Amino acid sequence: MKRFALTVITSIILISLFTVVHALPPYPTSKGKLILTPLSRNIFLKKRWGPEIIVGSQIGLSASNIKGLDAEDTKMIMATAGGLFVRLQNNPGSYFQLGVNYSSKGYNKKSTYEKGASTITDDYAISLNYIEIPANIGISFGEILLYNIDAGAYISFLNSANQKGKRTEETEGFGTVSHDINVNLKEDFNNTDFGFLFGGGVQYPITDKRRGTNISVFANTAMYFSMLKLMPNADIKNRNYRLTLGVLFHLDK
């Protein structure tokens, strides 16, 4: 319940910030003329004041690891992430964005321990797959090539958790035996995760219609920092870095 309340409060704050920025009128001079800032110049020259509705999709690579007191001897794991989002944007200017992603996180680990007369080495990867809901606000600036900077929060729901790798057991006088590891660990991890994200990127228009839907392409990088423990009895948290490519559909007003 506390996590749900925290998510709702964060979403309200983000929406409120966007609403305040979006509601700011253009600055009039004493002669009734408009002073156009770099972030609002194009919208006042081309469109009436109001948000542009943009629908987008993205897919890319993610690099994940864990941080915390119990995150010893772990290495980064490479995976994929992608999803859909809707953006309300003053073009260029401020924007609010809400999306749904499918993201893979986790880590690699190699551990060696003694068991009786045997030395056992586990070399495995923990793969955590989430349905993720990010909400962020940002600004964009530029003329044709637009630069975006944004920040926000996300909540994610665990879809699956698996341990895959190889276990090697070496016993003196009996040689070495290896076998695969493939274990479902979903019950060992918390079902929800919450954190903050920071990102930036560039977008470029590939159509310029006076009427109808325009299309842009973009590249974006982002950092996702978990604030909640992944397991009830272990101090480990997700850290995720992404590079994504995508397409934006600028819907005509």
Image (spheres, rainbow, N blue to C red):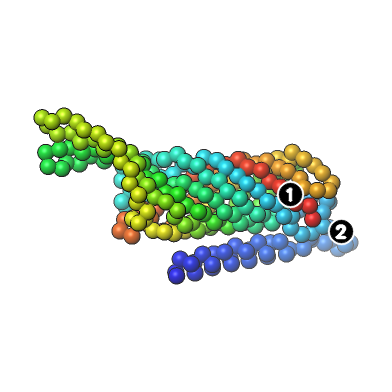
Kind of residue at badge 2: Lys
Of marks 2 and 1, the one in the foreground: 1
Kind of residue at badge 1: His
Is residue 117 toward the left or the right of residue 76 in the image?
left
Q: Position of residue 98 (x, y in %)?
A: 61, 57
- Tell me which residue sits at (63%, 55%) in the image: 97
Is residue 189 toward the left or the right of residue 85 in the image?
left
- Does the CB distance between marks 2 and 1 fall below 8 Å? no
Q: Position of residue 123 (x, y in %)?
A: 30, 38
Q: Which mark is residue 33?
A: 2
Q: Residues within 10 Å of mark 2 (few under 14, many from 20)?
A: few
- Tell me which residue sits at (52%, 49%) in the image: 102
SS under mark 2: loop
Measured along the vertical axis of the image, is residue 154 above or below residue 83? below
Decide which of 239, 99 is in the foreground and name it.
99
Q: Residues within 10 Å of mark 1 (few under 14, many from 20)?
A: many
Give residue 147's quadrant in the image.
top right
- Tell me which residue sits at (54%, 56%) in the image: 133
Residue corresponding to mark 1? 250
Quarter of the picture holding the C terminus: bottom right
SS under mark 1: strand
Residue 37 seen in render:
no
Measured along the vertical axis of the image, is residue 17 above or below residue 164? below
Q: Position of residue 68 (x, y in %)?
A: 35, 52
Residue 215 seen in render:
yes
Using the numbered discs, state the Cα–Cα distance from disc 2 to disc 1 in whole angstroms: 29 Å
